[in-house]
């Protein structure tokens, strides 16, 4: 019952935000607030990471978990989409653009920098104590702003669901990625099945996965989830222009939830404007489903 109450409490703000009256002013303010809130959350995670005892002795374990999770989630997701593309008819003409967007990766370094600042603050001022449930409160606020932004994106549920290829592609991607989480739980006896599924269901949403996993499993696993999804974003920015020429669905899947925002320009540049409906459909569905799966799986154990 407590897990169910926590689930409803955390997810409710997203649906409240989605069904609030849609005004350009409110959407703009939510987008601005979301940008600042992400940096605050990353800083808080950095502070909590700095308070972990003997953190230097745990770095090796974090890197091991991170490497395995990153390979499994991206690998299984890509294999699933490869099979999907082979057995279905891709509805758009494949692009021959040879663009590169590796310079965008530099902007992704801001996120780990925020964590580093929080970590340094914790070490420099060990007397700092964050209020109880800080992460949970920030998570609820984050989901409220996310709901407002999704509502203001102009993409309705009906419009998305009518894109049959996008819906099927999203289901294949999420199912295959979660299969990677299952394998991850089998490789490490200290990781339960539900935890493996929870860690895999960020789909690139580093700010949310880091927050949810920190709240559910502690800052070590929160850091693993965060850097796993941040790593997906950086890999997507590097490889989308090249993968798009041969396997468009895999290129879109590399971005995960960020295909609706951060990697959208790279995807449309590499694949052409004609793929925008597919990208938006995939991005919207994964954005809606990802926080639900994360909270549900983490609440299960």
Image (tube, rainbow, N blue to C red):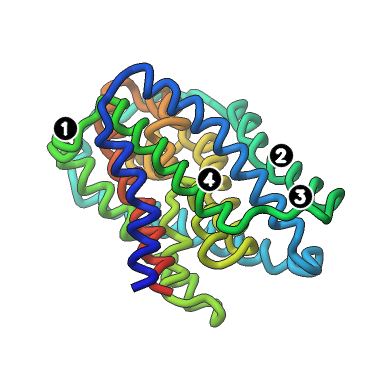
- Disc 1 to disc 4, how far (Cα)? 27 Å
Q: In the image, what residue occupies the spot 43% across and 66% down?
A: 298
Q: Residues within 10 Å of mark 4 (few under 14, many from 20)?
A: many
- Disc 2 to disc 4, how far (Cα)? 13 Å
Q: Residues within 10 Å of mark 2 (few under 14, many from 20)?
A: some
SS at circle 2: helix
**Disc on the earlier residue, 1 or 3:** 3
Label 1 or label 4, whichever lies nearer to me, is: 4
Q: Quadrant of residue 225?
A: bottom right
Q: Is residue 215 above or below residue 206?
A: below
Give the residue number, with chain letter if any, for mark 1: 159
Give the residue number, with chain letter if any, for mark 3: 119
Q: Is residue 244 above or below residue 139?
A: above
Residue 76 image point, x, y percent: 41, 59
Q: Are marks 1 and 3 in contact (CB under 8 Å)?
A: no
Q: In the image, what residue occupies the spot 43% across and 74% down?
A: 301
Give the residue number, with chain letter if any, for mark 2: 113
**Disc on the earlier residue, 2 or 4:** 2
Q: Residues within 10 Å of mark 3 (few under 14, many from 20)?
A: many
**Disc on the earlier residue, 2 or 3:** 2
**Disc on the earlier residue, 4 or 3:** 3
Q: In the image, what residue occupies the spot 49% across and 23% down?
A: 99
- Disc 1 to disc 2, how far (Cα)? 38 Å
Give the residue number, with chain letter if any, for mark 4: 207
In this orientation, does residue 81 appear?
Answer: no
């Amino acid at each position: 019952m407590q897990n169910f109450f926590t689930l409803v409490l955390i997810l409710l703000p997203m649906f409240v935000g989605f069904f609030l009256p849609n005004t350009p002013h409110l959407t703009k303010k939510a987008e601005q607030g979301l940008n600042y809130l992400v940096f605050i959350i990353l800083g808080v995670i950095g502070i909590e990471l700095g308070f972990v005892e003997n953190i230097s002795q745990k770095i090796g374990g974090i890197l091991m978990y991170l490497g395995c999770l990153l390979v499994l989630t991206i690998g299984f997701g890509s294999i699933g989409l490869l099979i999907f593309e082979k057995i279905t008819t891709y509805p758009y003409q494949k692009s021959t653009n040879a663009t590169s967007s590796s310079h965008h990766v530099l902007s992704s370094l801001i996120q780990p920098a925020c964590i580093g600042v929080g970590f340094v603050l914790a070490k420099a001022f060990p007397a700092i104590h964050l209020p109880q449930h800080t992460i949970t409160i920030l998570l609820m606020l984050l989901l409220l702003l996310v709901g407002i932004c999704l509502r203001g994106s102009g993409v309705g549920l009906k419009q998305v669901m009518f894109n049959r290829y996008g819906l099927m592609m999203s289901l294949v991607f999420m199912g295959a990625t979660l299969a990677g989480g299952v394998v991850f739980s089998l490789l490490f006896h200290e990781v339960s099945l539900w935890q493996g599924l929870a860690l895999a269901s960020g789909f690139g949403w580093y700010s949310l996965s880091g927050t949810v996993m920190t709240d559910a499993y502690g800052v070590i696993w929160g850091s693993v989830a965060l850097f796993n999804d941040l790593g997906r974003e950086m890999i997507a920015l590097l490889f989308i222009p090249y993968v798009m020429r041969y396997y468009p669905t895999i290129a879109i899947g590399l971005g995960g939830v960020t295909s609706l925002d951060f990697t959208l320009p790279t995807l449309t540049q590499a694949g052409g404007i004609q793929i925008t409906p597919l990208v938006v459909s995939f991005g919207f569905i994964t954005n809606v489903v990802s926080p639900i799966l994360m909270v549900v799986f983490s609440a299960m154990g």
